[in-house]
Image (tube, coloured by chain):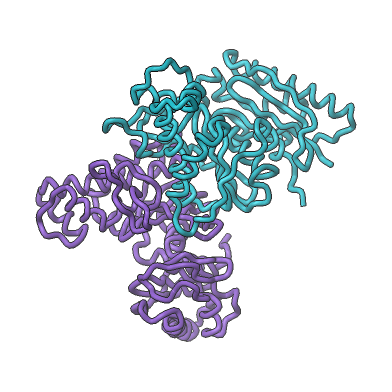
Chain colours: A purple, B cyan
């Protein structure tokens, strides 16, 4: 059996684990991402994390073939470079992610591979999660933002500029309020992310006239659970926007299955039911039987998918 | 040099031509599609058309290696069967397109291949048209309907149910009038096709209170050219809806280039300008330089792309 280190490098924390050739996480560790300290500091800390896992793997006699990284930001997977990143990780853009890690770890350059974390997440679910065994899958994650990845024949479709999967940035009829497009974090307006993300649920509650002090989507869900009419309406609108978006994407891409993940999908039926209803209302007749599945691997998905990058195809 | 017969089988007419291994159409013929007579009659007529071209090719000493078909309807490309089709071609659904043609022509089954005509169109443009030499391209055609195809590494992404490319059936904020979603031909409502197709331009003109007797988009363009304010508004809205949709799709798929085709793209600047403005307004920063190109091959695109299906990769 072959093993690889999978790294999930996010804006607040970095998790890494030893993953077997059949996708099992043997052990893992998590550190805070040094998101104010720049690329070199992050690479130093990540290399130390990976190194400690490699020492432990060697002690247990495991054959580690490489390191796969799923990282926040737009990642040039061919060169292992961070093309761009938000201010959530200062100084990350421009970092030579794979070369920097390989050098620090004394590995051959090709033994370290990286993709964007949402693509890693989708690759994990398509390998051993909800979409295991499928020829194609579309994963859409609804959380702090809205991201996605279309996995075709075992490979995420990364896009020509490695910007593919930005499924939160197309127009949503729900992202309008009193005729005005709701601003989106990308600088545009009226986008899916502006109405279907977690923060958007709180914003929708406020926009609709909600007066209770809520900090986040969780607060709105709690109010909705206590029969607050405005909270119920806000959740319903935002979930329907999410479902409508995924349904439209399914019509365009015709994946074998759809996987819906992210923090909002964990909110259960109050979000999932209106989301799936709107999704199915959108589907063309050819797609009526489309499986719509919750993700299965939880927080481990991106780590597992990242490891998959350096594990050769099992037969 | 190898040659193939490319067939573009549409709702009203069927064109076929002899296409060279470098994408040149040597000669072609067109017949009406027997769209009221059922699958067998259509196959008989198509086989006769192809046969006459093959006779002429043989007389000229050309080595014809097979027949590629781009056909209206959802086409199961693996089995060469028409999965579904609209009433525009009665009795077409269920037809064994490639096997039926191969038998009539005395060809080996694998010498006849078929895909949906929009995929063939996109494949043609990606082979020798506007997207020639690109690693990926998204073609969107705005005409009687709205269809598209994402061509990745030389292959259209057909979808698990061969329903991929239905880019007219996702939600458009423009496809609402006085708070009501505009009905779509698919049975849904509020879709891109309901506001961005050719017929939608005439419908928008009428909805906006236009009183002149117009039969089709061409009539609305003529009025707009004569400074009719309602016609100008209708064209502007429908073109912006088209551009917004393509921009959102580009954010999702990140193709190297976008090709916009179909009858509306031939209307020139009055449609193209507002379309491209809305498209670019939608793009994420990573895609700002995205080339947005008119199609180049005109009516020959699907024929050329269909022929490509049976011509091996030129080096």
A314 or A87: nearer the viewer = A87
Furthest residue in direction front, as rendered: B227
Q: Is residue B143 left or right of residue B122?
A: left
- Residue, x 53% and y 77% (percent of image)? A64
B265 or B189: nearer the viewer = B265
The C terminus of chain A is located in which quarter?
bottom right
Furthest residue in direction top, as rendered: B37
The N terminus of chain A is located in which quarter?
bottom right
- Residue, x 77% and y 43% (percent of image)? B22
- Residue, x 42% and y 38% (percent of image)? B241
Percent position of residue A238, x then y: 26, 48
Q: Is residue A63 above or below residue A187?
A: below
A289 or A45: nearer the viewer = A45
Percent position of residue A32, x then y: 34, 78
- Residue, x 60% and y 32% (percent of image)? B117
Percent position of residue B306, x then y: 68, 35
The answer, for residue A285, to whether it is visible in the render is no
Q: Is residue B297 above or below residue A13?
A: above
The quadrant in which residue B3 appears is top right
Q: Is residue A52 left or right of residue B129?
A: left
A276 or A133: nearer the viewer = A276
Percent position of residue B49, x then y: 74, 21
The quadrant in which residue B72 appears is top right
């Amino acid at each position: 059996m072959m093993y690889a280190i999978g790294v999930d490098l996010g804006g607040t924390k970095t998790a890494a684990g030893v993953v077997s050739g059949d996708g099992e996480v043997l052990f893992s560790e998590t550190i805070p991402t040094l998101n104010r300290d720049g690329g070199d500091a992050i690479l130093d800390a990540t290399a130390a994390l990976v190194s400690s896992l490699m020492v432990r793997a060697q002690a247990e006699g495991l054959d580690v073939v490489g390191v796969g990284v799923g990282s926040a930001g737009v990642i040039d997977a061919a060169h292992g470079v961070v093309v761009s990143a938000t201010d959530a990780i200062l100084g990350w853009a421009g970092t030579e992610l794979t070369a920097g890690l390989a050098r620090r770890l004394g590995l051959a350059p090709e033994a370290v591979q990286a993709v964007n974390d949402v693509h890693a997440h989708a690759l994990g679910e398509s390998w051993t999660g909800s979409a295991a065994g499928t020829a194609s899958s579309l994963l859409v994650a609804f959380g702090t933002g809205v991201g996605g990845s279309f996995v075709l024949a075992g490979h995420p479709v990364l896009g020509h500029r490695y910007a593919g999967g930005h499924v939160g940035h197309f127009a949503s009829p729900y992202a309008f309020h009193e005729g005005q497009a709701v601003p989106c974090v990308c600088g545009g307006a009226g986008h899916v992310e502006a109405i279907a993300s977690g923060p958007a649920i709180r914003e929708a509650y406020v926009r609709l006239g909600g007066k209770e002090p809520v900090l986040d989507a969780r607060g709105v869900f709690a109010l909705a659970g206590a029969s607050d009419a405005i909270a119920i309406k806000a959740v319903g609108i935002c979930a329907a926007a999410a479902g409508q978006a995924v349904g439209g994407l399914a019509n365009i891409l015709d994946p074998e299955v759809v996987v819906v993940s992210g923090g909002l999908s964990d909110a259960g039926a109050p979000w999932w039911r209106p989301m799936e209803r709107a999704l199915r209302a959108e589907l063309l007749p050819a797609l009526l039987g489309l499986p719509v599945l919750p993700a299965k691997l939880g927080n481990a998905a991106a780590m597992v998918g990242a490891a998959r990058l350096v594990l050769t195809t099992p037969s």
